Image (cartoon, rainbow, N blue to C red):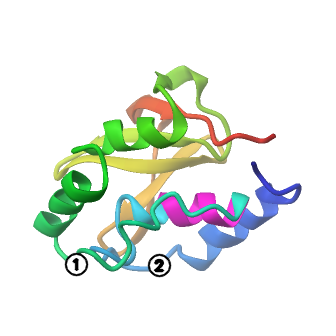
Amino acid sequence: MRHNDWASRLNQYIKQHLNTPFKWGEFDCCLFPADAVLAMTGIDFAEEFRGHYSTRIGAKRALVKYGKGDIKRTIEAKFGPALHRLMAGRGDLVLIDTPLGEALGIVWSGKIWATGEHGLMTLPMRNALCCWEVPCQ
């Protein structure tokens, strides 16, 4: 469940990390959105993954060992079935396709926010493949 002030918490989290560089196992395509959800809800859905990888290959292995094999199935196990991308609202998780494979982003200000090599980047909502609602209640 989101905190009453989830929007200001998410906004602050994004502002703090605008220029944080991508780093596997610390600030990557799954931990950035997980930390955004943590800021909004106080719940860490990536707890079992933290500290268990530091490379792209390690991340894939962690998805097999601690998750359901891939990002989509892992997030579905935690948030339920994926929804159509047009259902995505502020603060929700979205699955995107990147040159390195599937990744997660978070919806804010009508855009998808995701990690880039040198900091956060924004993508248009049309880049979402599907989404998951981060519950408000």
Left or right of 66 in this view: 39: right
Report the amino acid beneath label 2.
Asn
The single residue placed furthest to the left in the displayed view is: 57
**In front: mark 1 or mark 2?**
1
Q: Few, some or many C-alpha atoms within 10 Å of disc 2 (few <14, some 14-19, many ≥20)?
A: some
Question: Residue shown at 51%/31% (left/top)?
Answer: 80
Residue at point 32%, 49% (across, down): 103
Point out the image quarter for the C terminus.
Answer: top right
Q: Are marks 1 and 2 in contact (CB under 8 Å)?
A: no
As drawn, 16 above or below 43:
below
x and y percentages locating residue 34 in the rendered image: 50, 60
Q: Main secondary structure of the magenta part?
A: helix
Up-down relation of residue 109 to residue 81 (above or below): below
- Give the quarter of the image for residue 35: bottom right
Left or right of 7: which side holds 22?
A: left
Label 2 belongs to which residue?
Answer: 19
Secondary structure beneath dot 1 equals: loop
Of 76 and 129, the residue lying toward us: 76
Q: Badge 1 local density, few (<14 within 10 Å), some, or many (20+)? A: some
**Residue 10 shows in this picture:** no
Q: Where residue 114 sits: x, y (%)? A: 43, 56
Q: Position of residue 82 (x, y in %)?
A: 46, 27
Give percent across and percent down for residue 129. Answer: 37, 29
Amino acid carrying mark 1 in the image: Ser
Q: Is residue 39 magenta?
A: yes
Q: Note whether 55 is above or below 84 in the view shown.
A: below
Does residue 68 show up? yes
Q: Left or right: 36 with respect to 113? A: right
Tell whether 54 sits left or right of 38: left
Per the rendered image, the range of residues in magenta is: 33-40
Q: Which mark is residue 101?
A: none
The tag on residue 54 is 1
